[in-house]
Image (cartoon, rainbow, N blue to C red):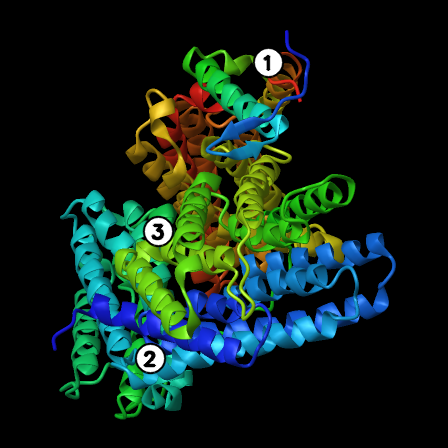
Amino acid sequence: MNLIPSEFVIGGVYFPPMLIAGLLGTAAAWLTAQLLNRYRLSRFFAYPPLVLLALAVTYTVLLATFVIPG
Amino acid sequence: MFLSRRAKEAIKTALAMAIAYYVALSMDWPNPHWAGFAVAAISLSTVGQSLNKGLMRMAGTLLAAAFSLTLIALFPQERWWFFVVLSAFIGYCTYRMAASERQYYWHVAGFVAAIVCMSSIPPTDNAFNIAVLRILETGVGILSYTLVSVLLWPSDTRGELAAAVRELTATQHALYGRYVQLLRGGGDPSETLGLRMQEVAQFNRFKAALAAARTDSYEVWEVRRQWQQALALAEEVMVTLEKWRESFTEVQTLELGALLPGIDDAAAEIDARMTGIGRLLEGPSPDRRPRALTLPWDREAVGSLSQFQKAALAVLRNRSLELERTTRALFETIADIQGLGPASERSAAPTPSPRLRVIDRDHLAAALRVMLGLWVAYLLWIYTEIPGNTAFVIMLAPFGMALATRPMVPVMAVFVPAISGIAFGSLLYIFVMPHLAGFAALGTLLFAVSFAVCYVFHTPRQALGRTFGLMMFVLVAGISNEQSYSFLSVANTALMFPLVFAILALTANVPFSARAEKVYLRQLSRFFRSASYLLTTMPWGVTTKPSRLARWRMAYHRGEIAGLPQKLATWGKAVDVTTLAGTTPEQIQALTTTLQALSYRLQELLDARESPQAEKVVQELLADVRAWRLRLQEVFDAWSRETAAESAQHLREGLDARLAQLEQRVAETMNRAAEGELDDADRERLYRLLGAYRGLSEAGLNYAIAAEGIPWGAWRESRF
């Protein structure tokens, strides 16, 4: 596990790690939501929009802590 | 040189864009892209349409400037009060935008207030300059586009207006022909659906063309009041035709020719006057003028009918006369517009009783959502380092207002053109603009880009892509006299928009899911709650006197009943049936149609209830009407809780028994009434009321039948 802050370099442009974690976290949350819809598991949630937001935050925090530390 | 209309329109916008920039830059005004924004926003196909939109943009800018300067003067150092008032003003503009005919005026007033207020902090001493600059540059953009479109290939909207009204009246004539066939027992009701949808689209085109033609054609301006009246009458004909059709079901088994001997003559007369309207619009004066019709009953034949049959006939007659009145008035108004003058005395439309002003719940929700989004953005701007700074809060206003007033449009439908516009603008900004020198090169680039965007996105459906393409390009390019290039500003802009749209996507789901089927269910529930409440108001004036608050509540629920079927029709089209196994678009369409019928029937009942009834009739029927009303109220309550809670079969049994009892009581009352106790008007009013009871019961049954076929379990299931 690498906890040293690092930036992403794409084509010579430096991106903050939190931005990348946020984008990946949102994409992962969206993908999870699609899968939950596909297998009709979303019916167990009372308010899916809030679950989506919670998933996005959870994924972002996890990614920012363990995968892309900033 | 033969250029297509598409190329001509693109050249006009491109030229206006280059001129607007030239003027703003030569005056050394900061933010010349505001002039470019005005050109991008008002570029429409005719001078009138553009000028109309331009005037609304200017008026909205003036209102926003006056409001912003006052606000800054009142709260220069109090950030919370400052934003409380600003967000309340933008919320108010959103509410008015959703409810008003001058939608664009309120839209501009809202977001320009955000621009002037937020651009001038800190410090606040340049607020006046910003407000004046915004007004000046908006004016330059409007003037530039107007001059170009007046001088270069001018096109006025008069021809378009004439074509729009001709097409609308032709469709109404065709629809009338089909309905006459239905009344005579022929034809298929489902065949008229296409014509009805065409009629609504053509009516909206007529409305838009009239607003534009008033501005660009003196001939239309001269008779604008008559045109406005023609528009109102065309709408009235549209509604009356539907109400007329609704009254056919219960008279299908009757011998109409014998009961209303003049009905064929009346049908032929209305048909002839509709043909006459079409001829009038083409120019030559018609060979005949409309004559007023009375449609008398054959008392002997009517006497042999049951009470409900008499009532159904009274409803049909009433609506036929209403159709007669509106078509005659439309004919006379069109004749007046064509300079022929009304030959007969104009039939005066009955003045509707004044209604109390009520709040529209959906418009209020839209306003609150925009305010919530603005507050989230404002707090993020204050407490975090957000890309775009104040621009982040500013951008929430135009996009938030546009999306909140069209909630059925998915956020992605706006996000994709906006991001594409930014990507396109960024490429030009980074790779092309640094190589330019002088206005000749810059002007050529502005012309070429504007031409390309307008040429590619030329259809009315692509208007959003065209406006965003142009706006994002001028925003990202950030053209000024002392041009500088910064990758950071492009990156910040590019990053700001996904965050703005993320906030909009979140607020769209507050407090309930924005999925179309969920909104549909909630509106359906509201419809039946309002219907149930309105039934409870029926004893008013008979057994109780309503308070002012109760009358206001009634006005609110009447507004809900009248407006919700239209909203349900719009949301019904947005429902994604692929996720709802067992539901088809036709089922949703059929359900919405039954709700529209239910709405008409309930309004008919409330109107009939408002006409004074003979005291004897009221007292005799009180108990039976109450039994029927309570049963229906029970059903509406059940439907408001669960969509298809009451089966059609169960409902039919309960209502049929009560209606049969009511019919018998009416017959007894009529027979017992002494000579002179009930006059003809009393009898007619009673039949109208009875017809309304029956009609509402039938409409409720039709809804129950349509709702039974839909798998509501899938609709209620939670989904992302």
**Residue B697 position by quadrant:** top left
CB atoms of marks 1 and 2 within 8 Å: no
Outermost residue on the top side: it is A1
Badge 3: how crowded within 10 Å, few (<14), some, or many (20+)? Answer: many
**Residue shown at the point (45%, 44%) measured from the top left:** B419
Residue B327 in sight from this viewpoint: yes
Disc 3 residue type (three-letter)? Ala
Chain to which mark 1 belongs: A
Q: Is B410 placed left or right of B136 in the picture? A: left
- From the image, tell me which residue sits under label 2: B149
Residue B229 in sight from this viewpoint: no
Badge 1: how crowded within 10 Å, few (<14), some, or many (20+)? Answer: some
Badge 2: how crowded within 10 Å, few (<14), some, or many (20+)? Answer: many
B446 or B305: nearer the eye? B446
Tell me the distance, in whole angstroms, between the alpha carbons under discs 2 and 3.
56 Å
* Secondary structure of residue under mark 2: helix
Tell me the distance, in whole angstroms, between the alpha carbons under discs 1 and 2.
58 Å
- State whether discs 1 and 3 lie on one chain: no
- From the image, tell me which residue sits under label 3: B312
B488 or B327: nearer the eye? B488
- From the image, tell me which residue sits under label 1: A67
Chain to which mark 2 belongs: B
**Residue shown at the point (43%, 10%) measured from the top left:** A39
B82 or B447: nearer the eye? B447
- Residue B128 is tagged as none
Outermost residue on the right side: it is B77
Disc 2 residue type (three-letter)? Ser
| Nearer the camera: disc 2 or disc 3 | 2
